[in-house]
Amino acid sequence: MRQDLLLELVLSGRPDLVVSFAQPNPELLAAIRKVNAKFDTGPSGLLAACAHEDSDGVLIAISGMAGLAPALKTLELGRPLIMGCKEAMVGGGQLLMHQAKLANQKIRPLDSEHTAAAILIDMAGGSDQIDRLILTGSGGSLRDVSQENQRYIPVTKVLTHPVWRMGPKITVDSATMINKAMEVIAASILFDMHWQNIDVLLDPTAKVHAAAITKQGEALALVNPPDMRIPVSWALGLEIADDSVHTGADAFAIIESLIPLNPAQRSVVELGHQVLELGGTAPMAFVAADEVAVSAFLDGHITVDQIVTLIKKTMDTVGPQAAKRSPLDDLALKSTENGAKLVISGLLEDDFPA
């Protein structure tokens, strides 16, 4: 955890409550005391933050499945939820949407592509008016590296994204295209759309965040700089620039300029399609397998090209059983998560012994 950044936030924002998974260092602890904030730690602290009496809503931007429990807590309390935790939206998305419906709340996505998609869908009059939703990707740090040469790429190179500055987990997912597979799954759940109506194309500049073709044959595209302050502003209810959305001939030209995926990239996105077709708790198994595989890569245990291979092998083993479990059962979700992690850990031991 970057305690220096948390220190800066504490001093500038003067919060009532500070939550950390790590014990604060002396400087951070002194700052917390200076602003008279309460301090809590771990999962219980996250739930306490969601339940804070003065909260108007909750924005969750935690990597991994740690974001699922506080998201569910937020919805159980009937509070607006801004979801920036992609893994939780994929792995527990059906449960979150079910809880949101019970709470009469909408989940606002905090992701450049999903934010753009939500804006375009609203403009079109709803997801049932969209014939083709296009999510874009930059291609990540391995965009120009052949599949055969990826095994030679060191961790430092993989973590050097050509456009975005992100954490290590999502940067690796961007390089492998697993991030795009997850975005298709999340978009299908968030917008209640079949994956056949969701496409993925590349924009190396990362300025085109999403585009759409409506059932009336109209084109829409959202274009703005690769700056997360823009989707954050929208998620918080602020206006975005009027010139961000392009329509008509301009939008068609933008869509035509986007680059199709190569066969290797396409196969990873299709893995997301397969997960959706399996249904049940398969998305949770997919997220869990990716978490373990990326961790193994960052630890130097495997090469980057082996991440997707390991995930596919794991899904071949656990997918059929996961498909039979209810995605609305939190115990089934947890069992699937643990089972997938156990299987992929076994594969790592058998195929890549230390």
Image: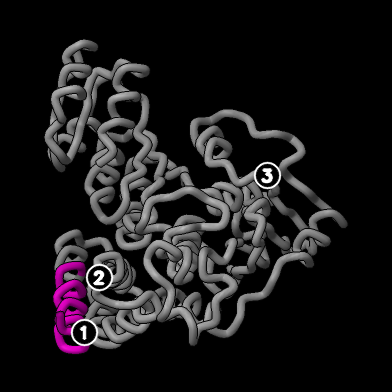
Q: Residue furthest right?
A: 249
First-in-chain label (1 vs 3): 3
Q: What's under tag 1, amino acid-wise?
A: Phe
Residue labelled with disc 1: 352
Find disc 3 in the rendering and name its residue. Answer: 224
Apparent side of residue 337 relative to residue 6 in the rendered image (left or right): left
Q: Is residue 347 magenta?
A: yes
In the rendered image, the quadrant that contains the C terminus is bottom left
The quarter of the picture where residue 20 lies is: top left
The three-letter amino acid code for the residue at tag 2 is Ala
User: Residue 250, how many percent across, how many down?
Assistant: 84, 54
Q: Give the residue type that dot 3 points to.
A: Asn
Query: Is residue 252 magenta-colored?
Result: no
Is 221 drawn above or below residue 272 in the view shown?
above
- The answer to which quarter of the image holds residue 171 is bottom left
Q: Say which of marks 3 and 2 sits in front.
A: 2
**Helix, strand or loop for disc 1:** loop
Horizontal and vertical percent for residue 151?
Answer: 41, 81
Tell me the magenta residue range: 337-354
- Label 3: state its secondary structure: loop
- Quick check: marks 1 and 2 in contact, CB under 8 Å? yes
Residue under circle 2?
A: 296
Indicate how the structure is coloured in the image: one colour
- Name the spot of residue 146 as percent of width and height, x first: 55, 81
Whole-Å distance between the Cαs marked 1 and 2?
Answer: 10 Å
Quadrant including the N terminus: top left
Residue 219 drawn above or below residue 293 = above
Query: Callout 2: 10 Å neighbours few (<14), some, many (20+)?
Result: some
